[in-house]
Amino acid sequence: MIDLYYWPTPNGHKITLFLEEAGVPYTIHPVNIGAGDQFKPDFLRIAPNNRMPAIIDTAPADGGEPVSVFESGAILIYLALKEGKFYGDTPRERTNILQWLMWQMGGLGPMAGQNGHFNIYAPEQVPYAIERYTNETNRLYGVLDRQLAGKPFVAGENYSIADMAIYPWIVPHENHKQNLDDFPNIKRWFEAVKARPATIRAYAKGDEVRGQAQPLTDAERAVLFGQTAASTAKV
């Protein structure tokens, strides 16, 4: 059984995508990031970076004590290795999957995240920041579009944790000022992943957890975007 500490953000969706695809039993423990749940001491013990998602595997492969894992990329690798799914069968395949997973973790996620922040959440418009992150997101879409040319999935013929990591960051493409019509290979791949039954189930779980979406309050904005080392130490 996997205990999943989760909120329906792109990084959270990565893990439910895997669990639904692999048919792994799991229990969701909501971590309301607007309410500051990610800073609670109990959560800090399994996620020292104060960020969800995180998991506790109560039945690890070695039969020992429960294993906790934080960071979405690390969680995907852990689950893929344990389940023997969605991580290729050869060292070459795994290297290709891993490099695209790292591309998302180090590039697409951070840049699209800053794009969304300055386009949607920032209390004031900062034209330089908006242009900078919108352009860089666009460049990364171009990289992905070229990679998907002539292949069904990011790392080749088979659906993998690379696709699961990247897809949730393409979902908010309109908020990130990107038009999928400009990227036909991404658009074809995006629609295929969107239609997978496990994807539909994973996003339905997210809707259940989130409930009725509401605009951020000032207090929630301060929790999400105003934390420092000193402030989190007081929580």
Image: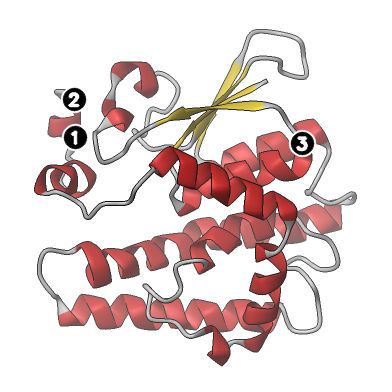
**Residue drawn at 55 percent across, 42 percent down:** 205
Q: Which residue lies under the disc numbered 1? A: 229
Q: Amino acid at mark 1?
A: Ala
Q: Secondary structure at mark 1?
A: helix
- Disc 3 from disc 2: Cα separation: 38 Å
- Name the mark on residue 233: 2
Q: In which quadrant of the rendered image does the C terminus lie?
A: top left
CA–CA distance in space, label 3 to label 1: 38 Å
Which amino acid is tagged 3?
Answer: Gly
Reply above or below: 213 against 116: above
Quarter of the image with the N terminus is top right
What is the residue that sits farthest to the front in this orientation? Answer: 212
Above or below, 156 relative to 231: below
Callout 3 secondary element: loop
Residue 210: horizontal and vertical position, in percent? 40, 43
Q: Earlier in the sequence, mark 3 or mark 2?
A: 3
Q: Is residue 95 left or right of residue 142?
A: right
